[in-house]
Amino acid sequence: MLRIECPYCGPRDHDEFRYGGDASVIRPVHDDADFEAWYRYVFVRENPAGPHREYWQHVMGCRQWLVVGRDTRNHEISFARSAREARA
């Protein structure tokens, strides 16, 4: 079982969280009419083997969104920080 260190609630089992996707994907601007840019954003994803940044929401706790660093080879979590802090 994965243990995620929520910066607000402390260490919790991953069952309390909901996976939110790849945190390294950059969304096109809202009024971008480029079909290919939106297609790549929505459907085209890398499948990395190694360190990866992901969004997780603590749905059974503080409900905050986090950016979590996880190694996809062994599921080792290297960091978890507020998504608000990660954007700044």
Image (cartoon, rainbow, N blue to C red):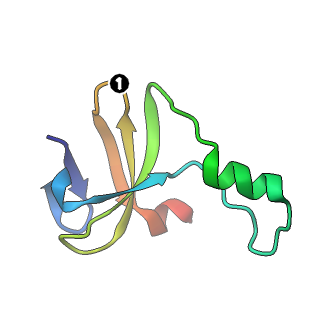
Give the quadrant of residue 19.
bottom left
In the rendered image, residue 36, in percent from the top left (x then y), is placed at: 81, 52
Give the quadrant of residue 81.
bottom left
Image quarter hosting the C terminus? bottom right
Residue found at x 27% / y 62%? 7
Image quarter hosting the N terminus? top left
Please, is residue 2 above or below residue 81 in the view?
Answer: above
Q: Is residue 2 left or right of residue 85?
A: left
Residue type at mark 1 is: Arg
In the rendered image, residue 87, in percent from the top left (x then y), is placed at: 55, 63
In the rendered image, residue 27, in percent from the top left (x then y), is placed at: 67, 60
Q: Nearer the viewer, residue 75 or 35?
A: 35
Q: Residues within 10 Å of mark 1 (few under 14, many from 20)?
A: few
Please, is residue 80 above or below residue 7 in the view?
Answer: above
Residue picked out by circle 1: 73
Q: Is residue 75 left or right of residue 39?
A: left
- Going by the picture, which residue comes out furthest to the right? 34
Residue found at x 19% / y 42%? 2
Kindly state the secondary structure of the residue where label 1 is placed.
loop
In the rendered image, residue 32, in percent from the top left (x then y), is placed at: 82, 68
Q: Nearer the viewer, residue 17 or 7?
A: 17
Q: Nearer the viewer, residue 82 or 32?
A: 32
Residue found at x 46% / y 53%? 21
